[in-house]
Every structure is written in C-alpha cells, then in structure tokens.
Image (cartoon, helix red, strand yellow):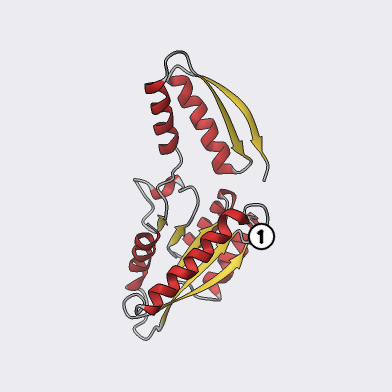
Amino acid sequence: MFRKALLGALAATAFALPAAAQDYVVGVTAALTGPPSSTYAPAVDAMRIYIDRVNAAGGVNGRKIKLVIEDDGAQPSKAAANTKKLITQDNVVLMVNASLSSTYAPVIAESKSENVPLLFASGVCPQSVYPPADPLQFCTTGYASHFDSQATLDFIKATAKGPVKIGFSAMAIPLSRGEMDYAMELSKKEGMEPVEIGRAHV
C-alpha cells in the first residue's frame, strides 16, 4: 500500500519537475519523539528501508529518492514549521505526514498553499482522501475514519443476540474525538445504547 501511494503521489508531481532534476526530494514530518513515537518512528524506519531498496533498484523514473526527515513530536506547530521548511527550503516534491491527526490541519494548509502532494503514512486516513478526494492527498492505509466505525457497528448489530450497550473511548486528538462522536451517533441510529468511557490524553 505504501508503494502504491508513494508512486501515485510522485507520478502526480513528475510532470512538474525540470528535466535536469536528479532526485525526487521527499519531505517527512513525523512524531519521532514523545509518547506517539513508538507508533510512528518504526514506520519512518520502514520507509527508509523501503526507499533504500527502491534506490538500489534504480529509483523511480530513473531518479533516486532523497528523504529529508524532521521530528515534530506530534506537535501541530512543529509540524507546520517542518512542512514550511521542507517545502520552501528543501524544495520537496512530496510531503509525508507520519504523526498524530492533530498535525493534519496545519500540514494540509502548508502543502495546499504550495500545491505540493501530501501522503499520510501509518495513521488514520483523513476524510479528504476518500471520494470526492482531494487530487493531491494520498494515504498508505485502509484504516479510515467513518468507514471503520460503520463496518464495526454493522458487525455488532448483525451478531448481537440482544440489546447492545456499547462503550466508546477516544484519544484527545481531533480525529479520534471526532470519530468517537460520529460512531456514538451512528450507534444510536442502529438502536444501540452508547456510553462514553473517556478521552485518553497523549
């Protein structure tokens, strides 16, 4: 999935590159430190390993991929600053966000302002990558807001042998909170009794 998303995003930028360009420069803002780093740092390591293999096999369209990685510690302000630096100073042709959803909005804003494709890696896919999708936003997973909740509640409804009382807990980040609220409302429509267990802080 990462390979397809990466190649798709690079294909979207290939026509805009000067003929003399030697490398595709890909910028990454990631939660490499702080509590979420146990999830995102290994994903960035896997990305490095994969890019090394791609480059060893000749790269993409005969060009090597150069990764420039910045740590945002899952902090939105750092993610925004990283994205701006990567786009304006490192001249990336693709931005990758490997961090919490709280960093999505500022990274999207910076990428959109410069018309640079954005790939969400190793996290929940935002709604903007699903139809009608933003043509310059991509995702590496099939793990998506709304769709996962719908499928889970459909399964519970189909297999329940009686009334359903269902608990919900979310991380204190925008995408998680929003999804919990959506799933709770959807569960009511399905005739279930939702209970909010809590909102965990990260």
Give the residue type at disc 1: Thr
36 lies left or right of 125? right
Compared to residue 153, the image places residue 118 above or below, namely: below
For disc 1, the marked residue is: 33
**Residue at image coords 57%, 51%:** 100
**What residue occupies the far bottom of the structure in this picture?**
20
Q: Where is residue 122 in the image (x, y as percent from the top left)?
A: 49, 54
Helix, strand or loop for disc 1: loop
**Residue at image coords 34%, 45%:** 131
**Residue at image coords 37%, 57%:** 1
Q: Position of residue 162 (x, y in %)?
A: 44, 13
Compared to residue 93, the image places residue 80 above or below, namely: above
122 lies left or right of 177? left
Compared to residue 173, the image places residue 105 above or below, namely: below
**What residue occupies the far top of the structure in this picture?**
162
**Residue at image coords 40%, 84%:** 22
Compared to residue 10, the image places residue 59 above or below, namely: below
